Amino acid sequence: MTKNIDDFRTRIAWVADALIPSDPKFGMPSATEAGMLDRLLPRALKERDDMAPSFFKALSRLPEDRPSDPVGTVRALGADDFYTISFLIAGAFFLDEAVTRKLLYPGQEALYETPDYDEIMETVERVQARGAVYLEVSAE
């Protein structure tokens, strides 16, 4: 049986807003205010469909209703599950153009500049020629 956002709507809402709350001072929406459930997360899960099974498996271990310590509850799932949930929710949040404009974040951009490998190698070769450098440190 394939899980989807609608199966976990309540959980996703409290988790997303716990990880990305609104900030009225800076005019930043919470994750759900930005459209996490209907627009952003579906797109993120489509792009990272390899993570969807572990995302929904982790969500299934969370309570339906928001606990008193929501971030602590998500962290208690363990590092791998916390990473999966927070990675997808944060990634989805950054898909919103209004959010990225407010943050002055242009998103990932292709770099067409070719690095000067000769300059890089000159630096590396000087360090290699010098050899390792250690400083004596006393425990006192």
Image (tube, rainbow, N blue to C red):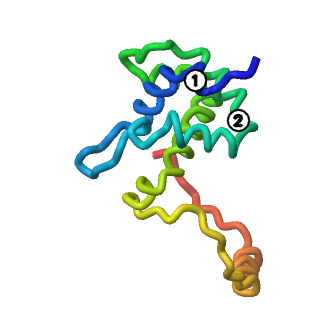
Would you place residue 22 above or below residue 96 in this image?
Answer: above
Residue 78: mark in rendering = none
* Mark 1 and mark 2 residues within 8 Å of each other at the beta carbon: no
Residue 51: mark in rendering = 2
Provide residue 98's location: percent of width, then percent of height. Answer: 42, 55
CA gap, disc 1 and disc 2: 17 Å
Name the residue nearer the viewer: 138 or 87: 87
Provide residue 71's location: percent of width, then percent of height. Answer: 44, 26
Q: Quadrant of the N terminus?
A: top right
In the rendered image, the residue lying farthest to the left is 25
The residue shown at (58%, 23%) is 6
Amino acid type of disc 2?
Answer: Met
Q: Residues within 10 Å of mark 2 (few under 14, many from 20)?
A: some
Would you place residue 90 above or below residue 134 in this image?
Answer: above
Name the residue nearer the viewer: 85 or 139: 85
The residue shown at (52%, 43%) is 90
Amino acid type of disc 1?
Answer: Asp
The residue shown at (65%, 25%) is 4
Q: Quadrant of residue 112?
A: bottom right
Total numbered labels: 2
Q: Residues within 10 Å of mark 1 (few under 14, many from 20)?
A: few
Residue 6: mark in rendering = 1
Q: Nearer the viewer, mark 1 or mark 2?
A: 1
Q: Quadrant of residue 61?
A: top right
Name the residue nearer the viewer: 112 or 9: 9
Regarding mark 2 in the picture, which secondary structure is present there? loop
Would you place residue 3 above or below residue 64 in this image?
Answer: below
Would you place residue 128 above or below residue 32 in this image?
Answer: below
The residue shown at (41%, 64%) is 104
Regarding mark 1 in the picture, which secondary structure is present there? helix
Provide residue 94's location: percent of width, then percent of height. Answer: 51, 50
Q: Earlier in the sequence, mark 1 or mark 2?
A: 1
